[in-house]
Every structure is written in structure tokens, then in C-alpha cells.
Amino acid sequence: MKKRKGSVGFVLQKKDAAVKEETHFIKRILNTLLIVFAAVVLGFGVTQFVMQSVYMTGPSMQETLKDGDEMLLNKFAYKLGRIKRFDIVAIKKIGSNDYYDIKRVVGIPGDTISVVAGRLVINGKQISSNYSFSVINSPGVLSESMKLGEDEYFCIGDNTSNSEDSRFINYGNVQKSEIKGKISYIVFPKERRGKVTYGY
């Protein structure tokens, strides 16, 4: 029995349509995977090199920062700019894995720093009493004058009565390579949300 040409053409058209639909579906899957991959790569790049959220743990930076604050760490800040005195920074000490210390830079390379009669003295000048960290009851290594070397920073917590920082031998001076970025913005809690002010 002979097949009619019309029915053969109809079958071929159905097959062509099915192939096109399958091809279109595969393209959509590949495009979706490509978008997801690009988003993951972009997200990784941002957190590694530009911006990352970090959390304040403990009371060492009170009242400037409080335990549980979520903040934005600007990792790009020191790629072009320099680390300034009184910046609040995230420090990753050698062997600390993914844990960041949040402290304030009070001494920069070349500074001579000490504590005299409970007051922080940098290069012969007392720090303004407007800063909570200007009064230090536990000077530690700063009971004697110290000069910072190249790429060395002296970092303390604003709550100097309850902070483990550069005043103590087991913490020591912070190397430039250990400073991973600048704390720029408080994200949470909502009532404290806003840019971190430095006063310089």
C-alpha cells in the first residue's frame, strides 16, 4: 500500500518541531546555568576583593561598635588609599583562619607611641579626651615609649578596659598585610544603620 506524500510531510514537520523545541529547551538550560555561574563568580569576586559583611563579636569596640553589629568591610579601601590613623579596620592575624578582629588604628609606621599618666601620647602629643581610647588604664607595652617600624600599625579597641590588642605581647603590632580592609558602614541593627564616622 502506498503512503500518501502529505502524511509523510506532516510526520517530518512534527519531528522538526520536536527537535526545535528540544534544542530551544537545551539552550534555555545552558543560558540559565551561564547566568548562575556568572552570578557566583561575580559574588565571589565582590566578597574577596571589594565588599564583605562582617560581625562585631564582644565588647572591645564599645560604644563605637557593639556586640552583634553587622558591618560592611571595604576591602578595596586600601588598594588605592592609605591606612589612616583612627581608621577602624578588620585584622586577620596569622593563623586566625576566617576570623577577623575589629580594632582601631592609633599608630602608623614611624610613629612614637606611649601612655603617660593614663593618656595615649602619639609623637609627643596627647590624644584629645573626646576619644574614648585616649584614656588607657592598662598601658601594657606602652608603659614605655615605642617606635613603629615600616608597615607596622598599633591597633587597640575603643573599650580599652576590655580589649585584647597591640598593647599586649601575645597580640603585638599589626603588619600591613594583616589589615584586610576598612569598616565603612553598619548594616544591622536597623536603629544603628549608617556610615561609620571617624572624626578626622
Image (cartoon, grey):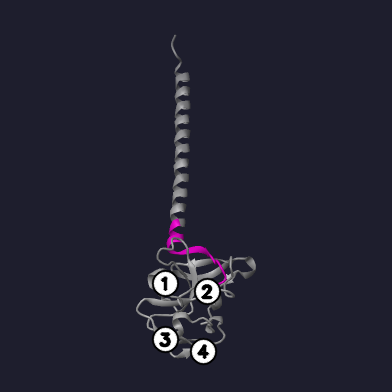
Neighbour tally class for label 1: few under 14, some 14-19, many 20 plus, Cα within 10 Å: some
Rounded to the nearest whole Å, what is the CA distance between mark 3 and mark 1? 28 Å
Label 1 belongs to which residue? 78
Closer to the eye: label 3 or 1: 3
In the image, 187 versus 170, the foreground residue is 170
Farthest-out residue, right? 191
The quadrant where residue 158 appears: bottom right
- Does residue 57 show up magenta in the picture? yes
Residue at (44% x, 18% y) in the render: 5
Span shown in magenta = 44-59
In the image, 167 versus 104, the foreground residue is 167
Closer to the eye: label 2 or 1: 2
Residue at (45% x, 84% y) in the render: 143
Label 3 belongs to which residue? 145
Label 2 belongs to which residue? 163
Is residue 50 at least partly visible in the picture? yes
Rounded to the nearest whole Å, what is the CA distance between mark 4 and mark 1? 34 Å
Q: Earlier in the sequence, mark 3 or mark 1?
A: 1
Amino acid type at image mark 1: Tyr
Rounded to the nearest whole Å, what is the CA distance between mark 2 and mark 1? 25 Å
Is residue 111 at least partly visible in the picture? no
